[in-house]
Image: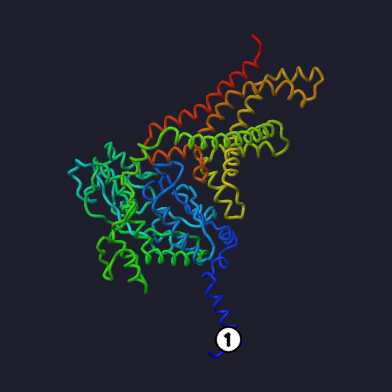
Amino acid sequence: MVPMQKNSWAKFVLIAGALMLPARHGLAADVDPALAQRLADGVLRWGGDAEGGAPFELRDPHNPGHVIGFEVELADSLCEVLSRQLGRPIRAEFVQYEWDTLLPGLESRDFDFILSGYEITPERRSKVLFTRPYYIYAQQLVVRAEEQRIKSLEDCRDLPVGTLDGSAAERLLVDNHMKMIESYSGQVEPYLDLELGRLDAVLLDTPIVAYYAAPNPKLKSVGPPIGRGEYGIALRREDRPLAAAMDQALESLMVSGRLRTILARWHLWNADQAQLATGPQREAELHGMGFDAAGKPLPGAGEVSGAVDRRIIAASAQLWTFGQYAPLLLRAAGMTVVLTLASMALAVVLGMLVALLRLYGPGPLPRLALAYVEFFRGIPMLLVLFFLYYGLAHYGLKMNAILTAIVGFGLTYGAYEAEVYRSAILSVGAGQWEAARALGMPDDLAFRRIIFPQALRTALGPMTNDFVALFKDTSLVSVIAVHELTKEYLILARSSLKFVELGLLTAALYLAMSVPLGYLSRWLENRWGPRR
């Protein structure tokens, strides 16, 4: 054997070392610093809405505190592939978000990508960067089982048709000039209203139909699926390196057959998915997805062990017990209490300050205080939350979602409290001031000792009303990804259809939080009121 030269040994070491290093695709070096830090921590956060339900994301029938779904499995599989590409473990973390605010949440960097049945449309392409599609869907028309009038979408032109707000199905109905379109925020309610006779038809994506209409003997599908579309993973436009890596990961899942396994497990695998395979790896991708080179299904390709029960919603209704879902509602109620107490404390301080400025402020301060009151009393609470959370973030003023909720409620309710305190102070007779001055009291001392205690008794009733109203208004904070009691109720109810049972418990929790306030208010009025 010829001895290896010194420089040859050096080359051998370099080549061997390079082969032993994990393959990398340059993600951490190219993404923005915040995302690079999250990758360094081994976490990729994705936004979705478990309230949306099966088969995308929903609560586990065996563990209502756990989220499952075909997109949950897809996110985990993508991170497994990315882990191999990066040479370090990457974990997928689900972020609960309102479906119609996913795009602002992505732009505000609350998560790294959207994976929630997000339809690829030209309008969305102008705002976000999409990966290659991971599922091809269509819309399916569903009617009541005894319906004989409706055979196609054309037959529904003058009839009420339900769909999901902001969906491709809704746009299809608009494009077909349907006259009575009823849009819903969830995919459960349209089928409930159809079953109850409030609608004559429902048009939604085929994956939704498979879990909410097909298992229901009172409903049936009519006509073939229409309006083909694609689901994709949405990322911020500057995250091209991450999008490229996820495209490679999706290709790997197709070639390995992992994507087909996920789709088949959730009863979503069909011949349409052959169109997902593109590029030079098309034949390998088709084979991995269970198709031959011509795109025809291979024998037994749709069979998979551990398939999900199509009646998973009914299973949740049967399996969930009080002991399983009550702790989840109680925990969410704790968030409601924290938000209410903190917001009301801020509102009380702001309200008293604004009331005093309106009554006794020098120069332009009374007018400014009046402008504050009229402004925050005149605009919707949702607008305040959206502006503080999403609007200010565009100017670098990003606040935590919980802090945003407290500030938003505090500012709004501070305006109402200001008017309560102002009217209560004015209700104290002028003779009280005169008597205090006659005794030589300075005005500030007279206000603290005489005027304010009497005004407080008058203000207690309206303050209690505002406090109770604030408990209920906290349900609005789900639009900025704060998980409180009403949101938890909606997620659990839409994952099990136990609207009544869960609703009664939720109502009981709200009553348990608000009714004691009335008793406290009356006790304070009796304690501080005049002796009888």
Whether 252 is drawn above or below 414: the answer is below
| Residue 104 x %, y % | 50, 53
Which residue sits at x=54%, y=33%? 470
| Residue 126 x %, y % | 45, 62
Report the residue that reaches farthest toward the front: 1
| Residue 121 x %, y % | 39, 59
* Residue picked out by circle 1: 8
Which residue sits at x=77%, y=19%? 436
Left or right for 94, reference 272: right
Which residue sits at x=51%, y=46%? 481
Circle 1 residues within 10 Å: few <14, some 14–19, many ≥20 = few
Give the SS element for disc 1.
helix
Whether 129 is drawn above or below 178: the answer is below
Looking at the image, which is closer to me, 320 or 524? 320
Report the residue that reaches farthest toward the right: 440
Which residue sits at x=46%, y=47%? 98
